[in-house]
Image (cartoon, rainbow, N blue to C red):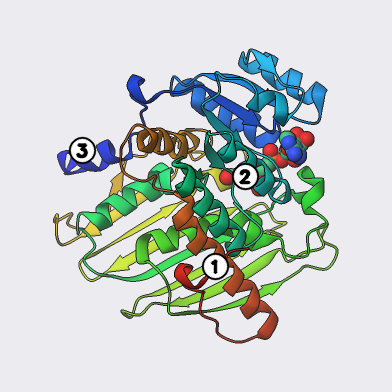
Amino acid sequence: MIEQFEPIARACTIEVPVAHRRPIALVGAGAIADLAHLPAYRAGGLEVVGLTDPDGSRARDVAERHGVERVYRDLDELLADARVDVVDIAVPAAAQPEIVRRALESGRHVLGQKPFAPSAAVAARLARLAEARGRVLAVNQQLRFDEGMAAAHEMARLGWLGEITSFTISVDIWTEWTSWPWMLELDELEVWNHSIHYHDVVRWFLGEPARIFASAGRTPGQAPRGETRTTTVYEFPAGARALVAAHHENRWGDQRATFRIDGTSGSVRGTLGLLYDYPRGRPDTLEVTSEVVRTDGWVPYPVTTRWLPDAFLGPMASLLEAAAGGPPPRTAASDNVGTLALVEAIYRSIRTGECESPAAPADIALE
Ligand SMILES: NC(=O)c1ccc[n+]([C@@H]2O[C@H](COP(=O)([O-])OP(=O)(O)OC[C@H]3O[C@@H](n4cnc5c(N)ncnc54)[C@H](O)[C@@H]3O)[C@@H](O)[C@H]2O)c1
């Protein structure tokens, strides 16, 4: 069986050929830049030539610890550095669209953070701008590169599962929202800032749903203003169903984050290791049973890397491949417009108590 996993492992390996490498500058030197972006890029052999953050002492500290040569005073100084070819963004969502616009207009390729924009319309306008400027614009939805999920996707792509009929993601964890003071004030919290990863991978596997129903709740005494648990049910045109349920107020220590994908010829089941002890976590687990490759029951796939930091090399590697003339990035902004339209439909459903259909990207008016 082990040799059957070889093409899966190859498809999940994230490497940046030397010919694809370009100098990167980072906007935002917060927790995720420190814990994930910079370690992942270093491991991938990428050069981060400078960074900027309005919190100057934080910027200097992060730069020094990761061996980043320059700390720019602001975005103007960063964009004036002719060495910078790619702008990588890790700031709160509200600040991002203006930075993306300015970086694209200066001729840079851009990797935006999730959530990419406050609306699908703003995302569509930025994707259009990138296209007009001939620049690559991608989004850091790196769960598509997390090894457990990426291996499951490759197994599905190779037909091991047959036709997918069901996809379930179930997360029951404690999230320390106070680590992000700006998130505590958001009216819409959970889907925009966490479950957006799950909704993005459900789209990656199954495409656009015909309709969804979503419900949200809070817990008495919770720190944030917005919702901390959401449940979304999907119906797809060909008959598949999906369920994404995420609860962040598990106060009892038994963190749990599982996924399962069922098809007509096989199934995969696994865990998202990062969420068992964020931010260190552990590698995912993944098991597969398939009539196509004849596993004779459930067989474990050996996951050897982590969501954080390893998967963070993926969106950048894919952007750099596109910039070198390769296919569009796996997490292209033009595709992410669909994820944001889905998030908007989820919040509409939460408000109305009705089923909703996400707007088709082609129907989204530009803002
Ligand atoms: N798995 C993931 O993809 C993942 C995980 C965590 C956070 N994030 C996202 O990354 C972003 C940052 O999260 P974080 O955990 O680093 O938050 P953080 O609060 O630790 O850091 C944010 C940083 O952005 C800086 N900043 C704010 N406005 C800026 C601007 N205009 N220009 C430059 N810097 C600016 C702040 O000074 C701060 O240092 C958020 O959008 C968050 O949703 C993604």
The residue indicated by pointer 2 is: 101
Query: Which of the two marks, 3 or 1, is nearer to us in this view?
Result: 1
Mark 1 neighbour class, 10 Å CA radius: few under 14, some 14 to 19, many 20 or more: many
Q: Helix or strand or loop: what does disc 3 sit on?
A: helix
Q: Amino acid at mark 2?
A: Arg
Instruction: Compute the Cα span from label 3 to label 1.
Output: 36 Å
Ligand 1 lies in quarter: top right
Q: From the top left corner, tell me how far across and down residue 80 is, in percent.
A: 65, 23
Q: Residue at x 81, y 29 (%)?
A: 55
Q: Is residue 1 above or below residue 39?
A: below
The residue indicated by pointer 1 is: 341
Q: Which mark is residue 6?
A: 3
Who comes first in sequence, dot 2 or dot 1? 2
Quadrant position of the C terminus in the picture: bottom right
Q: Amino acid at mark 3?
A: Glu
Who comes first in sequence, dot 3 or dot 2? 3
Query: Which of the two marks, 2 or 1, is nearer to us in this view?
Result: 2
Who comes first in sequence, dot 3 or dot 1? 3
Q: Amino acid at mark 1?
A: Ala
Please tell me in which quadrant of the rendered image residue 6 appears: top left
Q: Is residue 217 above or below residue 172?
A: below
Q: Residue furthest right?
A: 221
Instruction: Compute the Cα span from label 2 to label 1.
Output: 20 Å
Q: Is residue 20 above or below residue 125?
A: above
Query: Which of the two marks, 3 or 2, is nearer to us in this view?
Result: 2
Q: Which mark is residue 44?
A: none
Q: From the top left corner, tell me how far across and down residue 278 is, in percent.
A: 62, 42
